Image (tube, helix red, strand yellow):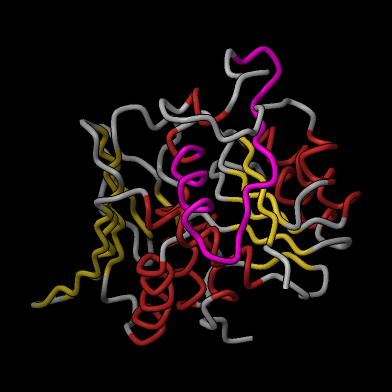
Amino acid sequence: MTDFRIGITGCAGRMGQMLVREVLDREGCTLSAAQERTGHRWLGHDLGEMMGGAKFGLVVGDDPVTLFATSDAVIDFTSPAASTIHAGFAAQARTIHVIGTTGLSPEQEDELENAARHTAIIWAPNMSLGVNLLFALTEQVARTLGNEFDIEISEMHHRAKVDAPSGTALALGRAAAGGRGVDFEEHAILSREGMTGARPEGAIGFSTLRGGDVVGDHSVIFAGPGERIELTHKASDRRIFAMGAIRAALWARGKPPGLYSMRDVLGLSQD
């Protein structure tokens, strides 16, 4: 069997470089292409040299048509706008598209749905095994406990993270809402300031912390009368996200078109 060809877009970023290393180290996989945005200083240069090592013999490009045409799967941790555009190229090339980008708008999510009619797209706010188990546990606990248990979600990330709350925190909130059988948008309180009044019954609250080089900490707190349940996941190495993304790409081989999640990849979906 020939090696599974994986392309990386956003290869100069922290996650992009981590993905490159993981693909190169993964038996049965080969790095087919590496892409950056037009105008980036890495364009036209050998990827290995730009990453501070020996030459890979692979030049960084900016043509998404070539990226998707020469790859069995493309892994994408870029930006909402870029990932949405890339999904269109994936649909045209019938190439697996693994997206770890967060902060997509509802309209951009609809575009992913449309592209997924033509190819397998795996989109998840977090690619780690542990966090996806946390999603499932959060839904289960929320389903079991009544409204006498208040739900609060706390997250902390590094100082450079641009979206808040994190995509993972929002997904945890949606998991809790799904467990309770309520509409997330109607019950979410994303921030608090000033004289907010008493906490509304059934609310799903959020708190956001930013600082240092924290990879990602997430906690879901179920606070009830006389007791409190806390579910926590702490990431200390970005490698877990790269490993999960490659696992998702390999899982999607031979899968029919559709929009999948890491819960599908890990067999945690209840559908």
Which image quarter is the C terminus in? bottom right
The magenta stretch spans residue 33: yes
Q: Residue at x 82, y 68 (%)?
A: 257
Front residue (pair 82, 49): 49
Extent of the magenta region? 16-40
Q: Quadrant of residue 202?
A: bottom left
The magenta stretch spans residue 20: yes
Q: Would you place residue 11 above or below residue 262 in this image?
A: above
Which image quarter is the N terminus in? bottom right
Q: Is residue 251 left or right of residue 163?
A: right
Q: Residue at x 76, y 41 (%)?
A: 86
Q: Is residue 236 left or right of residue 98?
A: left
Front residue (pair 65, 198): 65
Give how far across and how far down residue 122 sits, in percent: 65, 61
Front residue (pair 223, 172): 172
Q: Residue furthest left?
A: 226
Q: Would you place residue 33 above or below residue 121 in this image?
A: above
Q: Would you place residue 131 above or below residue 54 in this image?
A: below
Q: Residue at x 51, y 38 (%)?
A: 16
Q: How many marks?
A: 0
Q: Would you place residue 88 above or below residue 125 in this image?
A: above
Q: Quadrant of residue 252?
A: bottom right
Give how far across and how far down residue 140 sits, in percent: 40, 83
Give how far across and how far down residue 67 sits, in percent: 77, 40
Q: Is residue 67 left or right of residue 250?
A: right
Q: Residue at x 67, y 46 (%)?
A: 7
Give how far across and how far down residue 38 sits, in percent: 71, 18
